Image: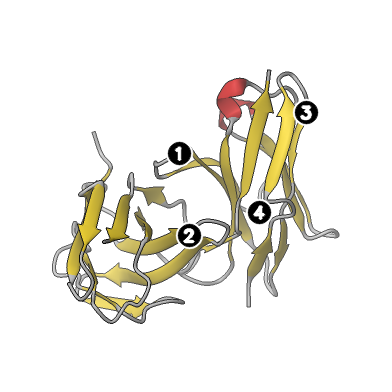
Amino acid sequence: DGGITQSPKYLFRKEGQNVTLSCEQNLNHDAMYWYRQDPGQGLRLIYYSQIVNDFQKGDIAEGYSVSREKKESFPLTVTSAQKNPTAFYLCASSIGGVVHTEAFFGQGTRLTVV
Amino acid sequence: AQSVTQLGSHVSVSEGALVLLRCNYSSSVPPYLFWYVQYPNQGLQLLLKYTSAATLVKGINGFEAEFKKSETSFHLTKPSAHMSDAAEYFCAVSANTDKLIFGTGTRLQVFP
């Protein structure tokens, strides 16, 4: 079955550590996105990529980094510079293009700082 | 710039009652509009989308939404609520851009 796989489902991070969240898709989509979800704030865009080896900052990119070395993969690293990383992180993909088509979402990763 | 406003962070209805979730958008160009549903600790699933064809859009699970340009609205409705409809619902907009902008969400509770 085609879809988006995020791993792990739950992740615990100590303060000062970097952690990487995985996102893989087999939908042959060009565009991939990372969103952060906090209660009452909806989804906020962290980074997005329309094509391999290219990505753009979203609205809240500070403290995060991404790479897009393969079409299927778009990992997100939460760095120690992110002051409040505890949140639910969602990865999405779409066919891409200027006008946004339907986005397909993974099941999310819940990150907690301990 | 585009934006979406969802009025009411929480909506409660009785089983069998009408569901109405409100969404207003702001866009300087004709928008594409979406409604997504999220169950606890899961990703988002597309309910329906408006792409400048018919203004009344039918989606999955009996939901529908009507695009009203004069009111800049795209409210989501369902004639009769089920217990299984309890979830969080997000309205989103995209217009002449490669980004999807989400509202802050509305949590729907359904009481027996």
Q: Is residue B26 above or below residue B43?
A: below
Identify the secondary structure beneath mark 2: strand
Whole-percent x, y for residue A90 in the image: 36, 55
- Residue B18's tag is 3
**Closer to the camera in the image, B79 or B109:** B109
Q: Is residue B21 above or below residue A1?
A: below
Q: Is residue A3 left or right of residue B106?
A: left
What amino acid type should be assigned to the residue bearing mark 3?
Answer: Leu
Q: Quadrant of residue B111?
A: top right
Tell me which residue sits at (66%, 63%) in the image: B4
Q: Is residue A107 left or right of residue B96?
A: left
Q: CA distance from mark 2 to mark 3?
A: 28 Å
Disc on the earlier residue, 1 or 4: 1
Q: CA distance from mark 3 to mark 4?
A: 26 Å
Q: Is residue B110 visible?
A: yes
Q: CA distance from mark 1 to mark 4?
A: 31 Å
Whole-percent x, y for residue B21 in the image: 72, 43
Coloring applied to the structure: secondary structure
Identify the secondary structure beneath mark 3: loop
Q: Is residue B29 left or right of residue A76?
A: right
> Which residue is situated farthest in the front direction here?
A114
**Which residue position holds label 4?**
B52
- Residues indicated by labels 1 and 4 sit on the same polypeptide chain: yes
Q: Is residue B56 visible?
A: no
**Nearer to us: label 4 or label 2:** 2
Whole-percent x, y for residue B56 in the image: 73, 40
**Which residue position holds label 1?**
B40
* Chain of the residue displaying label 4: B
- Residue A38's tag is 2
Q: CA distance from mark 3 to mark 1?
A: 22 Å
Disc on the earlier residue, 3 or 1: 3
- Residues indicated by labels 3 and 1 sit on the same polypeptide chain: yes
